[in-house]
């Protein structure tokens, strides 16, 4: 962990070392045992240097691809989420999710200068650089914003040009050819927005049947947008049959005609193609990074099953190679001969010979550290091998601990035929009892049952269940949308009063804004169940849709159209105040 | 084995034993005529009508022309002799089947003795039996199991499948309503399926047919045999072979029909001990409900298989009243139109007393009306329970079954009881995930060893090198010689992922092979293409020029959607522009869930149907925003399929204008049944719980085609044969899989070509042209 002060990087007592390193790369960092969690990578100088952003260690590893050795590792931030290289190859751009910064690192060969941090909107998770290198775009998750940073004026003149509001919590983004449009994908739901960069506004926000979009790329001929994502079928159940035959969860590569993407009025799916990755006995849980060769081959990271798929033109899956644990990002050498894959949990980079379809090497990023309990739990959380045949992981529904916002027909409410909205696990440790009917008194029981009956996996060992529990206990509620606005504190206060006047706190009692009991709030599921445990309202504005069946798309609908448990009608101003209060939670 | 696959066997057996005939007079009338005046034409009609059935039984059991002919003759001679003395039923098919089976068994025993003696003298090695002989073992097992079915189930199977009667003809002959006939037909199928499964013939149906068709030519009644038989039966002057005489005598003297029937009963009870499922125990509603959807015969669970042996051992027998009350409560709470409880209790009591051959008390209805609790039901059952009297008391288990079956017979909407065993099979069938090494197995009686008849297309045994005809010498080091087949099946079975090592050899081979096989799910195809390209692949193009593909859905299973996804990939590679989806002769287990998955797969963001259930609750089924075959014009072929699951899909495709329907009306009535599983693995019961509502209010059940294209019986039969043959992975040499003349397919192709030309979906063409 590298604390920062006033924007000046001080590498916790390693400043002297860093200075040394800037002159001559050293392996000091990679000899220190630590968990690194490589999450993004870029190639530079042809195919000679690979830069890897490490999420956990906040460091950037530099690999000499010829010798396949770590040339250097340097700590630059706290929690890196993405990495990019300017088109002229002179600057690396890393985003630090925890610090809320874009880090600009001037590069001389293997040597990196001290990063220059630019404050962006909180929680940045991805970065794209314009083709001319003049600007970059940083998407911030809970803030739901895109920060546009001017890179043209050199390191001294770096500044934020613009902030663009996004309609959902974003993750991936991709600049479309021509540089005037940027595609942004939701981090959880199946939604794609197109941002008109010239006008600085969202031009379209369209639904994609699916969720968990973890890969965006252009097809070889540039005519199609490739999207990796998952599809959860609410008509299917979590029975073994439905999981076995790929009826419940599918792992997909979707090809969307770029013309549809560009045209805000077009049917996104017209002439699209959906490739189902994986097959019976061989699920392809949680597809992530995707890249294409000039010849049209598609290379895909299958994060949940620790594999990479290499498909021919027009193919979805193709041959599959085992790589390290949780491959997420990948990049191809300019000659399309090699693929480099970041194995996030293995702390390694796999080098794949695309011609021979073999793993040529697995490069360790440094001295490994012994993972703690929660670390092991995190690895299990993202591991689709926990499910029958590798079709899905916990992550497939509880994306990054949150929710995909979809309905799943599990047995946790005692029957099939009663699909319910997937609940967020952010802050889950404080919101017992668990499950919609509040029947589960111990979180560990819910964990075991989810793996066994919802994912149809083998029973967890006591250690595994404990590890998963430890991981879930580290998850904290997301900040409400209101936290990122210059909102009216008085309105929030008035909203709090409305909340109490309406006796919302009967069921949603602070500080967790839930209750240990179940209530009949006039809702009924398909089996006639009417008693539900109130979901916590912490971070409620980042969730949705709302209610057990997702009947309300927005919080405004909950209060407006659904009039959820209102003791008396709200005036327009009361409703606005109450929303301001809820969005601040 | 899916009911569809079983039907295929029966269908092929039917092909094997020959054609249909037109004579409409009931058998009893013909026999009366024959008995009164020795009218040879009456007997001739009977020989023509039932000859193929009898020949099939004899030939399959004996595989020896002379022996089979003797048996055939003897069977009809016995019929002729007894024409005047027996109180005949409407159809004698069942009687003939029993006699022929019995005579064939006798002949076999006699031959075995004789051959043993001959061997001792000649000391000649037995000719090694190649794989081609094995399917006959299966036929023999099929016959044995048919033989063990109670007559009320067997007879409709014989008439409809082995004799090729239509449901109407068979019902008329038996003096039953068509509904009764179809119900018993369905129940018989289910029972037979369960029995074959227990014999290790799970899923074997499809491949059995291949073997059967190979030998079909030999299975017709040999020329001259019918005439010779008629002569023998109508003339006392004919000289009979000693063998025939002996056979006739054996039946006439030693084996009166009553004894035969008793024997059948004993066999049924014995075989039931392997079933073991008891429908007893308390019921918890909402436990694992599985809504299913079907016309009356689509869900055809067997009646509970009872285990008298276990019952007798059990010091505290499970409580009949407890189970019955549980079912009554389920009916009250969940049935769409629950009948009064006392009516069901009366029906149950009547069935019990009828089985015990006791006259019901005159105040039965009054007593039943007083029952208001489980305890009172218990008292009621004790009060009416037959006392030992002059007539021999049937076993307690049989009476209890009668009570529960009577109860269920009284529930409107075709309620059925499932035994635990049947439930398990049903679950595996609908899940299409049998776990095993994927072989069809039979006993090679001469080697006294199990023999692999055929390794299944997607089974691990086939991948691991098992060959048709392989004799299994060892299973995990245990020698198989002389071991019962069921026991060997037990050795071979195990949990998914575990392995089993078998030592096999071809009968003629000198060396053995050791195969290490992993037990895995062995799925069966439910979707097929136009013509088979190889054992593992299909050609889908019905019109290569216009790029119109063709897909036949044999059934709707858990796997169907997955199969369609795979096919889509192939069609994209083939640059297909339009698609015919053939639902004709499609059948299955009638699961609404499977229908929903497939319809959702084919439709894009549309309301598919609503289910209105008990308490006027309405549930909408909506398709998600993705669909298979996006942008392809779709024509769907339909005919008299009665499975409601297919009906639901067809209705949704029609109501949303996704496809144009071509063919003949379907039969499903939109009833939705729910299978309630009973706790403690005690089986389950299906109840009518809802009605399916179409989203286009102008459309009703059953589904009508947009273009009515009638076909002749012969055309329909030819298409059925063509479709069912698709299930056979490797057609016999010289077999022809070209489609027969098919006006319905032709019409669908025309519509699609037209649509492609006009670049508008075929539905618009239907509106323009009116209902064709």
Image (spheres, coloured by chain):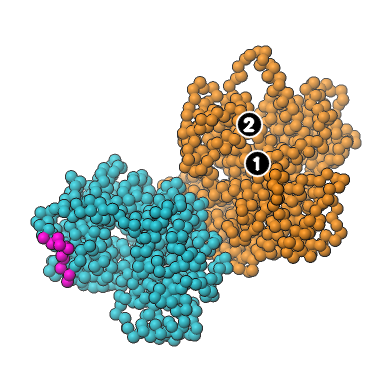
Q: CA distance from mark 1 to mark 2?
A: 21 Å
Q: Is residue A117 left or right of residue B89?
A: left
Q: Residue at x 28, y 72 (%)?
A: A164
How packed mark 2 is, by other alpha carbons closer than 10 Å (few <14, some 14-19, many 20 or more), is: some
- For label 2, the SS is helix
Q: Which residue is mark 2?
A: B137
Q: Are marks 1 and 2 in contact (CB under 8 Å)?
A: no
Whether residue B768 can be seen here = no
Chain A's colour?
cyan
Q: Position of residue B687 (x, y in %)?
A: 66, 58
Q: Are marks 1 and 2 on the same chain?
A: yes
Q: Is residue A8 magenta?
A: yes
- For label 1, the SS is helix
Q: Position of residue A331 (x, y in %)?
A: 26, 52
Chain painted orange = B
Span highlighted in magenta in the image: A5-16
Residue B274 marker: 1
Q: Is residue A484 left or right of residue A575?
A: left
Q: Position of residue B343 (x, y in %)?
A: 77, 61
In depth, the one of A198 and B588 nearer the eye is B588
Q: Is residue A211 magenta?
A: no
Name above or below for residue A544 compared with residue B604: below
Corner quadrant of residue B104: top right
Q: Residue at x 59, y 54 (%)?
A: B591
Instruction: State which chain disc 1 sits on.
Output: B
């Amino acid at each position: 962990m590298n604390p920062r002060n006033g924007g000046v990087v001080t590498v916790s007592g390693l400043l002297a070392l860093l200075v040394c390193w800037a002159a001559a790369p050293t392996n000091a960092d990679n000899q220190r045992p630590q968990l690194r969690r490589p999450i993004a990578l870029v190639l530079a100088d042809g195919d000679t240097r690979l830069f890897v952003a490490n999420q956990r260690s906040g460091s950037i590893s530099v690999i000499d691809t010829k010798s396949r050795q770590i040339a250097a590792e340097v700590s630059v931030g706290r929690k890196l989420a993405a990495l990019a290289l300017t088109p002229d190859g002179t600057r690396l751009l890393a985003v630090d999710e925890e610090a809320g910064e874009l880090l600009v690192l001037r590069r001389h060969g293997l040597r990196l200068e001290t990063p220059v941090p630019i404050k962006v909107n909180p929680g940045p998770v991805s970065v794209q650089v314009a083709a001319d290198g003049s600007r970059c775009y940083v998407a911030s998750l809970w803030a739901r914003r895109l920060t546009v940073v001017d890179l043209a004026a050199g390191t001294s003149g770096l500044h934020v040009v613009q902030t663009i509001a996004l309609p959902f919590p974003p993750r991936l983004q991709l600049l479309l050819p021509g540089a005037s449009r940027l595609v942004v994908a939701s981090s959880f739901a199946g939604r794609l927005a197109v941002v008109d960069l010239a006008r600085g506004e969202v031009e379209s926000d369209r639904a994609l049947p699916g969720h968990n979009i973890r890969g965006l790329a252009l097809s070889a001929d540039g005519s199609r947008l490739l999207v990796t994502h998952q599809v959860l079928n609410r008509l299917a159940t979590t029975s073994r049959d439905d999981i076995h035959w790929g009826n419940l969860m599918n792992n997909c590569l979707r090809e969307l005609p770029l013309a549809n993407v560009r045209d805000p009025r077009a049917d996104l799916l017209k002439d699209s193609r959906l490739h189902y990755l994986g097959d019976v006995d061989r699920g392809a849980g949680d597809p992530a990074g995707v890249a294409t060769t000039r010849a049209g081959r598609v290379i895909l990271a299958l994060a949940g099953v620790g594999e990479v798929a290499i498909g021919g033109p027009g193919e979805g899956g193709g041959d599959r190679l085992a790589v390290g644990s949780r491959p997420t990002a990948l990049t191809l050498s300019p000659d399309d001969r090699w693929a480099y894959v970041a194995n996030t949990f293995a702390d390694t980079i796999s080098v794949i010979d695309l011609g021979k379809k073999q793993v040529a090497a697995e490069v360790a990023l440094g001295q490994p550290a012994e993972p703690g309990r929660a670390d092991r739990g995190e690895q299990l959380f993202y591991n689709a091998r926990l499910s029958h045949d590798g079709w899905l992981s916990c992550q497939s529904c509880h994306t990054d601990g949150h929710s995909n916002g979809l309905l799943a027909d599990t047995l946790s409410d005692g029957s099939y035929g009663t699909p319910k909205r997937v609940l967020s696990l952010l802050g889950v440790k404080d919101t017992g009892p668990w499950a919609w009917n509040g029947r589960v008194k111990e979180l560990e029981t819910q964990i075991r049952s989810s793996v066994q009956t919802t994912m149809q996996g083998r029973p967890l060992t006591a250690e595994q269940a404990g590890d998963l529990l430890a991981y879930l206990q580290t998850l904290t509620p997301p900040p409400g949308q209101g936290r990122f606005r210059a909102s009216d504190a008085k309105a929030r206060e008035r909203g709090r009063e409305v909340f109490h006047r309406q006796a919302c706190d009967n069921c949603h009692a602070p500080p967790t804004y839930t209750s240990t009991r179940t209530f009949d709030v006039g809702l009924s599921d398909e089996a006639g169940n009417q008693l539900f445990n109130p979901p916590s309202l912490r971070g409620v504005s980042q969730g949705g849709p709302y209610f057990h069946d997702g009947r309300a798309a927005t919080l405004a609908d909950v209060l407006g159209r659904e009039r959820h448990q209102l003791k008396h009608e709200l005036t327009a101003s009361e409703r606005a105040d109450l929303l301001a209060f809820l969005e601040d939670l | 084995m899916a009911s569809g696959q079983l039907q295929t066997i029966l269908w092929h057996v039917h092909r094997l034993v020959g054609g249909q005939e037109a004579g409409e007079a009931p058998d009893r009338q013909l026999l009366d005529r024959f008995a009164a005046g020795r009218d040879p034409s009456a007997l001739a009609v009977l020989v023509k009508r039932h000859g193929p059935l009898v020949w099939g039984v004899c030939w399959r059991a004996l595989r020896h022309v002379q022996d089979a002919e003797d048996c055939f003759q003897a069977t009809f001679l016995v019929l002729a002799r007894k024409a005047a003395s027996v109180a005949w039923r409407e159809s004698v098919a069942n009687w003939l089947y029993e006699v022929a089976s019995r005579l064939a068994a006798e002949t076999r025993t006699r031959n075995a003795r004789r051959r043993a003696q001959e061997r001792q003298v000649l000391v000649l090695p037995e000719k090694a039996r190649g794989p081609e002989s094995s399917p006959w073992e299966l036929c023999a097992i099929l016959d044995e199991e048919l033989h063990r079915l109670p007559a009320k189930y067997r007879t409709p199977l014989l008439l409809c499948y082995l004799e090729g009667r239509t449901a109407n003809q068979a019902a008329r002959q038996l003096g039953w309503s068509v509904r009764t006939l179809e119900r018993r037909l369905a129940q018989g199928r289910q029972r037979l399926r369960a029995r074959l499964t227990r014999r290790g013939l799970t899923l074997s149906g499809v491949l059995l047919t291949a073997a059967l068709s190979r030998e079909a030519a030999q299975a017709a009644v040999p020329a001259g045999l019918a005439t010779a038989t008629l002569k023998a039966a109508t003339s006392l002057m004919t000289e009979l072979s000693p063998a025939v005489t002996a056979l006739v005598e054996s039946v006439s003297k030693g084996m009166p029909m009553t004894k035969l029937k008793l024997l059948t009963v004993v066999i049924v009870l014995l075989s039931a001990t392997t079933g073991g499922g008891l429908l007893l125990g308390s019921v918890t509603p909402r436990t694992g409900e599985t809504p299913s959807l079907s016309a009356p015969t689509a869900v055809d669970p067997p009646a509970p298989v009872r285990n008298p042996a276990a019952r007798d051992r059990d010091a505290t027998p499970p409580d009949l009243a407890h189970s019955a009350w549980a079912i009554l409560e389920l009916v009250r709470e969940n049935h769409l139109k629950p009948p009064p409880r006392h009516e069901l209790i009366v029906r149950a009591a009547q069935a019990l007393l009828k089985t015990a051959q006791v006259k019901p008390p005159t105040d039965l209805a009054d007593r039943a009306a007083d029952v208001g609790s489980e305890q009172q039901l218990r008292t009621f059952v004790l009060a009416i329970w037959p006392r030992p009297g002059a007539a021999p008391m049937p076993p307690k288990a049989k009476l209890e079954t009668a009570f529960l079956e009577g109860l269920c017979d009284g529930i409107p909407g075709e309620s059925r009881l499932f035994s635990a065993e049947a439930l398990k099979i049903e679950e595996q069938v609908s899940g299409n995930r049998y776990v095993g090494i994927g072989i069809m197995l039979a006993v090679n009686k001469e080697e006294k060893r199990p023999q692999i008849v055929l390794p299944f297309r997607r089974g691990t045994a086939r991948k691991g090198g098992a060959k048709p005809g392989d004799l299994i010498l060892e299973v995990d080091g245990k020698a198989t010689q002389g071991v019962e087949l069921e026991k060997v099946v037990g050795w071979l079975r195990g949990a998914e992922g575990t392995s089993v090592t078998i030592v096999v050899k071809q009968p003629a081979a000198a060396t053995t092979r050791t195969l290490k096989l992993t037990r895995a799910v062995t799925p069966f195809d439910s979707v097929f293409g136009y013509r088979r390209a190889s054992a593992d692949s299909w050609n889908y193009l019905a019109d290569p020029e216009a790029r119109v593909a063709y897909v036949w859905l044999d059934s709707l299973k858990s796997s169907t959607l997955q199969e369609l996804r795979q096919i889509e990939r192939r069609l994209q590679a083939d640059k297909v522009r339009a698609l015919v989806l053939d639902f004709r002769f499609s059948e299955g287990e009638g699961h609404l869930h499977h229908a929903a998955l497939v319809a959702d797969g084919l439709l894009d963001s549309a309301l598919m149907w609503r289910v209105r259930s008990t308490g006027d609750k309405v549930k909408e089924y909506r398709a998600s925003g993705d669909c298979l075959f996006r942008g392809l014009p779709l024509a769907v072929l339909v005919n008299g399929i009665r499975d409601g699951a297919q009906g639901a899909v067809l209705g949704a495709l029609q109501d949303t204008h996704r496809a144009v329907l071509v063919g003949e009306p379907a039969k499903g009535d939109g009833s939705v049944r729910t299978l309630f599983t009973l706790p403690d693995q005690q089986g389950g019961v299906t109840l009518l719980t809802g009605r399916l509502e179409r989203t286009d209010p102008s459309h009703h059940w059953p589904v009508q085609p947009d273009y009515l294209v009638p076909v002749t019986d012969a055309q329909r039969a030819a298409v059925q044969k063509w479709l069912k043959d698709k299930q056979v992975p490797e057609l016999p040499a010289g077999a022809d899989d070209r489609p027969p003349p098919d006006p319905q397919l032709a019409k669908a192709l025309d519509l699609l070509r037209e649509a492609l030309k006009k670049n508008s979906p075929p539905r618009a063409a239907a509106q323009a042209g009116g209902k064709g």
